[in-house]
Image: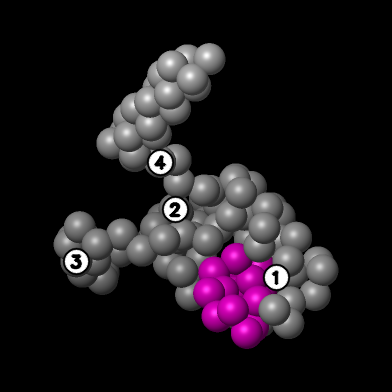
Amino acid sequence: MKQRQETRAPPPKATGFKSPSFYDLFEDYDLIVASFATQYGIRLQIEDDMDFREFAQLLTGLNGDTPLGNVVRIRSETDPKRIKDFSPAERLIRDRWREKHAKAPSLAVQKSNAAALVGAFKQIARNN
């Protein structure tokens, strides 16, 4: 295995802003492999000389004309007009992602809902 020397400066530190991610390294592995082959001509199964930093940089550079890019486009769409025009297969891709990655209600919302439910049960008990 060849040694590579890194001559570039390290990337700037994160500023605390976290953009939403619309892919998962494990769940979307096959799409990533296909996308590297499509865009870069790299077959990840036989590539033995790529470190994770290079992999991450190339992954970030994948465009929308790759299998992963197309799926990310579908998952991340927010325009109701475009979503309305999705095919059934595109809707399924988007709906599955949204269901899997739906945010749980905050603790404050959960407590508020529980208090409302208790109040409703008390009201029912008083009326019976």
Q: Is residue 38 rendered magenta in the image? A: no
Compared with residue 59, is residue 81 higher up or lower down, i.e. above or below?
A: below
Point out residue 119 in the picture as x, y percentages from the top left corner.
38, 25
Q: CA distance from mark 2 to mark 1?
A: 21 Å
- What residue is at 46 percent from the left and 59 percent from the top? 21
Q: CA distance from mark 3 to mark 4?
A: 33 Å
**Which secondary structure is most common in the magenta stretch?**
helix
Residue type marked 1 = Pro
CB-based contact (under 8 Å), mark 3 and mark 4: no
Identify residue for label 2.
52
Q: Residues within 10 Å of mark 2 (few under 14, many from 20)?
A: few
Identify residue for label 3.
12
The answer, for residue 29, to whether it is visible in the render is: no
Looking at the image, is mark 2 or mark 4 earlier in the sequence?
Answer: 2
Q: Secondary structure at mark 3?
A: loop
How many numbered marks appear? 4
Looking at the image, is mark 1 or mark 4 earlier in the sequence?
Answer: 1
**Which numbered disc covers residue 67?**
1
Q: CA distance from mark 2 to mark 4?
A: 35 Å
Residue type marked 4 = Pro
Compared with residue 33, is residue 99 higher up or lower down, i.e. above or below?
A: above
Looking at the image, is mark 3 or mark 2 earlier in the sequence?
Answer: 3
Point out residue 111 in the picture as x, y percentages from the top left corner.
32, 30
Q: Secondary structure at mark 2?
A: helix
Q: Secondary structure at mark 4?
A: loop
